[in-house]
Image: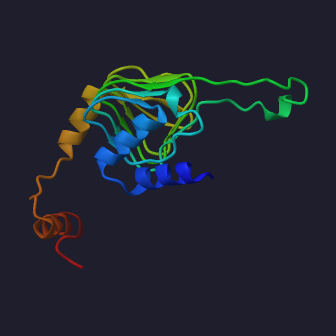
């Protein structure tokens, strides 16, 4: 790994969100406004990735912009297979998800943790699994989230006390 690539990886892993976004744009990723990015895995073709506005990319998400052609390269020396990835506005991609080439996600979609996205995810839905499939609409997911919502204080110690009491009955 060259020094430039190492510095990019360090900025993506340890930099502020402002530094991360600036670094991604410098690598060629087309990225909108108000995004949060917590991964450094943008593959060897980051310029084939487009991310809309207000998107959250969780930890260890992997973008793959090429297919596997190595076993065929003895027969076809110049065989390559690349494809773009686009994440539309107002999406969240869960921890350790893998997004494969020729995929468009959203807008207003959620991809669950550890999912492998092999095909487009429709707007306004939640998709998860390997391979990822639609589980519910965003409206249905919102109702589920609201049903299990816990109103916790902003203070970390008080929040801990509320959550421990809720889940452990105040017992250690």
Q: Position of residue 69 (x, y in %)?
A: 77, 30
Q: Position of residue 39 (x, y in %)?
A: 44, 47
**Closer-to-camera residue (88/120):** 88
- Residue 164 quadrant: bottom left
Position of 6 with respect to 1 (left or right) is: left
Q: Nearer the viewer, residue 164 or 117?
A: 117
Q: Left of 145 or right of it: where is 70?
A: right
Task: State the residue in front, 169 or 105.
Answer: 105
Quadrant in which the C terminus appears: bottom left
Q: Residue at x 25, y 38 (%)?
A: 144
Q: Is residue 22 above or below residue 159?
A: above
Determine if residue 61 is in view: yes
Q: How many marks?
A: 0
Q: Is residue 136 above or below residue 171?
A: above
Q: Residue at x 53, y 49 (%)?
A: 4
Q: Position of residue 78 (x, y in %)?
A: 80, 24
Where, by quadrant of the figure, is residue 76 drawn? top right
Image height of 24 relative to 151, above or below? above
Asked if residue 66 lies left or right of residue 146, the reply is right
Q: Is residue 57 visible?
A: no
User: In x, y percent, where is residue 49?
Assistant: 48, 29
């Amino acid at each position: 790994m060259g020094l430039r690539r190492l510095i990019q990886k360090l900025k993506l892993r340890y930099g502020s969100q402002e530094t991360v976004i600036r670094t991604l744009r410098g690598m060629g990723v087309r990225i909108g406004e108000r995004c949060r990015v917590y991964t450094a895995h943008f593959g060897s073709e980051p310029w084939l990735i487009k991310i809309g506005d207000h998107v959250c990319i969780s930890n260890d998400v992997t973008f793959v912009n090429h297919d596997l052609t190595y076993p065929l390269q003895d027969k076809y020396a110049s065989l390559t297979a690349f494809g773009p990835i686009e994440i539309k506005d107002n999406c969240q991609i869960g921890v350790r998800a893998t997004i494969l080439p020729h995929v468009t996600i959203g807008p207003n979609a959620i991809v669950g943790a550890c999912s492998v996205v092999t095909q487009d995810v429709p707007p306004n839905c939640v998709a998860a699994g390997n391979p990822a499939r639609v589980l519910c609409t965003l409206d249905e997911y919102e109702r589920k989230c609201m049903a299990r919502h816990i109103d916790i204080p902003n203070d970390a110690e008080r929040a801990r006390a509320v959550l421990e009491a809720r889940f452990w009955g105040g017992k250690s």
